[in-house]
C-alpha cells in the first residue's frame, strides 16, 4: 500500500476512534440515555402510638397528668345560673368578684309590669352521685324561688334547690334530682404544699368547663373577703387563672382530688392578675356534710379570742422564736375555760399541726364537730405541755339592743365629742372608743370599742369591736377624758400601755399597745 494511503487510513481510524469515544462519553453522562438503576420500593411507617408513652411522661413530669385529670374532673364541675331580683341585693362588690349579670334586652310590656330580674352565674362541684353540689354562698345569694338552674358538662340541665348555706365560710350546698351523677374525689387539703401543681376548673366568663393550671402560691391566706362577724378565712392561694364565673369551681391536685373550692381573686381590674383563693377541701366538706345532714353548720368553739404572736410579744414572753397564737381572752363557761386554759397561753400546735396565725387555729378547730376533743400544745411561762379540750357547740348569737340614739342606729360618720350622752374619740393606734354616760351620773361613762381599723396596732394586738375598757395599767377609767389622760401619761413614760377589758360574755382580758412613732 502506498504511503499516502496508509496515512489517510490512519487518519480515518483516528477520527473513527475519537468519534466513538465521544459518543461513549456523551452516553455515559446523559441521565436520559444512561441505564436506570434498580430501586427497591419500601413502606412508610405510620403509627398512632407515641414515641414515649403517656405513663413514661407522667412519671417524668406531673404536668403530663393534666390531660387525664381534666378528663376525670371536668364532668364533676357544673355551671350554675341564679335568677335574682334587680331591686334586691345583687352581690357586685369587691368581695364578690365572680358573678356575671345578664339583663334581658328584649324587654316586653309584661316585663315592665313584672319585677325586673337579672341572672348571675358561677360554678359548683358535684360531691355525691345523687346530686349534692358544693358551691359558694355568693353564687346563689338572693336567688328567687325556683331560680336556680344547673348545667352539667354534657349539657344536661336541671333545676336546683338550696339545701343550706354558711356565710362565715361563703359556702353553700344545692341539690339536683337524679342518680349516677359523676362525683369529685375529695382530697386532704392538709397534705398540699406551696409549689405543688394544681388545676382550677370552672366556667369563667360563661366559657363552660375551662381548665387552667398553676401552683400553690401560699397557704392560710386571710384576705378579708368574707363579710361576716364569725368569718373563717384560711385560703389556699394559687396562680392558676381564676376569673369571674370560677366561683364555686374545683381546685384539684395532680392526683385529681378536690383540695379546694375556688372563691375569690385579688385584682385591681376585677379580672385575673395571678392571685386566686380557694377554701380548703377539709373545711369545705365539713361545712357541706353539716348542711346536708342538719341543714346548718354545727360549729365547735374553743371559747377564746386570739391573736398571732408577733416579734415584740415573743420578746416579752422570752420566746426563742416567733411562733404560735396567743389566747387573749377566755370566755366564761367556754371549752377552754373549763379545760384550764388561761389568757396569755400560746397555742403552738392543734392536733399536731403547727399554727402561727389566728386563722390557722380557726381552721383547725372549724373542721371538728362539737363534742370532739382537740389536742392543743400550749406554751405557758416557758413550759410546754399538751391539753385535751372537749369542744362545745356554738350557741346562736344574741345581739343586745343598745339605745345609742333615738332610732337605735349608729351613724356611719360619727362626730367627735359629746353627742347627747354619747362621746366618741379616735386614737392613733387605730381604734375609736364610745363612752355612754350613766343616766344617774353623767360624769361616769361605760367605755366600749366602737371601731378597730384593720391591720392597725390595735387590730394586730387583738382589740375588737364591742369590748369594754375597764382599766389602764391597773387604774380604773371612769370616762373617755380620764382614759385619754392615762394613755398620754403612760405613753410618755413607758411608750406602752396595758388595757384591761371585758368582752360581751363577761370574760376579762388584756391588750398591750405600743406608742406610734411621731
Image: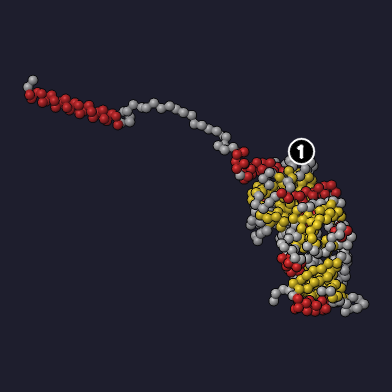
**Where residue 26 appears, x then y in whole percent?**
27, 30
Q: Is residue 74 visible to the viewer in this orientation of the structure?
A: no
Q: Quadrant of residue 157?
A: top right
Q: Could you tell me which quadrant the C terminus lies in?
A: bottom right
**Where residue 340 appears, x then y in whole percent?**
86, 59
Residue at 82 percent across and 53 percent down: it is 374
Residue under pointer 1: 180
Q: Could you tell me which quadrant the N terminus lies in?
A: top left
In this picture, is 344 found above or below 439? Answer: above
48 to the left or right of 474: left
Residue at 66 percent across and 56 percent down: it is 275
**Where residue 315 appears, x then y in whole percent?**
73, 67
In this picture, is 16 found above or below 441? Answer: above
Which is nearer the eye, 262 or 365?
Answer: 365
Q: Is residue 33 visible to the viewer in this orientation of the structure?
A: yes
Which is nearer the eye, 206 or 58?
Answer: 58
Classify mark 1: residues with Cα within 10 Å, few (<14), some (14-19) or many (20+).
Answer: few
In this picture, is 308 found above or below 190? Answer: below
Q: Quadrant of residue 227?
A: bottom right
Q: Residue furthest top?
A: 1
Residue at 84 percent across and 69 percent down: it is 501
Name the secondary structure under disc 1. Answer: loop
In this picture, is 139 found above or below 151? Answer: below
Amino acid at each position: 500500500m502506498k504511503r499516502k494511503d496508509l496515512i489517510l487510513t490512519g487518519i480515518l481510524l483516528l477520527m473513527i476512534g475519537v468519534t466513538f469515544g465521544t459518543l461513549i462519553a456523551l452516553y455515559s453522562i446523559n441521565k436520559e440515555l444512561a441505564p436506570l438503576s434498580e430501586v427497591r420500593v419500601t413502606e412508610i411507617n405510620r403509627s398512632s402510638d407515641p414515641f414515649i408513652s403517656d405513663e413514661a411522661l407522667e412519671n417524668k413530669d406531673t404536668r403530663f397528668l393534666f390531660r387525664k385529670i381534666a378528663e376525670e374532673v371536668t364532668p364533676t364541675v357544673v355551671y350554675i345560673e341564679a335568677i335574682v331580683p334587680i331591686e334586691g341585693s345583687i352581690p357586685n362588690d369587691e368581695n364578690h368578684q365572680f358573678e356575671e349579670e345578664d339583663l334581658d334586652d328584649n324587654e316586653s310590656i309584661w316585663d315592665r309590669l313584672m319585677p325586673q330580674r337579672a341572672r348571675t352565674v358561677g360554678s359548683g362541684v358535684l360531691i355525691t352521685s345523687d346530686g349534692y353540689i358544693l358551691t359558694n354562698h355568693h353564687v346563689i345569694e338572693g336567688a328567687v324561688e325556683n331560680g336556680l338552674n344547673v348545667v352539667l358538662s354534657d349539657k344536661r340541665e336541671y333545676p336546683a334547690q338550696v339545701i343550706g348555706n354558711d356565710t362565715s365560710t361563703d359556702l353553700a350546698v344545692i341539690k339536683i334530682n337524679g342518680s349516677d351523677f359523676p362525683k369529685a374525689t375529695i382530697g386532704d387539703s392538709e397534705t398540699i404544699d406551696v409549689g405543688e401543681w394544681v388545676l382550677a376548673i370552672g366556667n369563667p366568663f360563661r366559657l363552660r368547663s375551662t381548665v387552667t393550671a398553676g401552683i400553690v402560691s401560699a397557704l392560710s391566706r386571710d384576705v378579708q373577703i368574707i363579710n361576716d362577724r364569725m368569718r373563717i378565712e384560711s385560703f389556699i392561694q394559687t396562680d392558676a387563672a381564676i376569673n369571674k364565673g370560677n366561683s364555686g369551681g374545683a381546685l384539684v391536685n395532680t392526683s385529681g382530688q378536690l383540695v379546694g373550692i375556688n372563691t375569690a381573686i385579688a385584682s385591681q381590674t376585677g379580672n385575673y392578675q395571678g392571685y386566686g383563693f380557694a377554701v380548703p377541701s377539709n373545711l369545705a366538706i365539713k361545712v357541706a356534710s353539716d348542711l346536708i345532714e342538719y341543714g346548718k353548720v354545727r360549729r365547735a368553739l374553743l371559747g377564746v379570742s386570739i391573736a398571732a404572736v408577733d416579734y415584740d410579744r415573743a420578746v416579752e414572753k422570752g420566746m426563742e422564736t416567733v411562733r404560735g397564737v396567743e389566747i387573749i381572752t377566755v370566755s366564761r363557761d367556754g371549752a377552754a375555760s373549763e379545760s384550764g386554759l388561761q389568757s396569755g397561753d400560746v397555742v403552738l400546735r392543734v392536733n399536731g399541726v403547727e399554727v402561727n396565725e389566728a386563722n390557722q387555729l380557726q381552721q383547725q378547730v372549724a373542721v371538728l364537730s362539737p363534742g370532739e376533743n382537740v389536742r392543743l400544745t400550749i406554751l405557758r411561762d416557758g413550759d410546754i405541755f399538751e391539753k385535751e379540750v372537749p369542744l362545745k357547740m356554738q350557741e346562736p348569737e344574741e345581739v343586745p339592743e343598745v339605745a345609742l340614739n333615738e332610732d337605735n342606729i349608729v351613724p356611719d360618720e360619727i362626730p367627735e365629742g359629746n353627742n347627747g350622752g354619747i362621746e366618741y374619740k379616735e386614737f392613733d393606734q387605730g381604734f375609736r372608743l364610745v363612752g355612754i354616760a350613766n343616766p344617774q351620773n353623767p360624769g361616769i361613762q361605760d367605755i366600749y370599742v366602737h371601731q378597730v381599723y384593720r391591720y392597725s396596732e390595735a387590730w394586730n394586738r387583738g382589740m375588737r369591736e364591742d369590748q369594754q375598757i375597764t382599766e389602764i395599767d391597773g387604774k380604773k377609767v371612769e370616762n373617755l377624758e380620764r382614759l385619754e389622760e392615762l394613755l398620754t401619761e403612760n405613753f410618755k413614760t413607758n411608750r406602752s400601755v396595758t388595757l384591761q377589758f371585758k368582752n360581751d360574755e363577761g370574760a376579762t382580758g388584756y391588750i398591750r399597745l405600743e406608742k406610734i412613732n411621731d
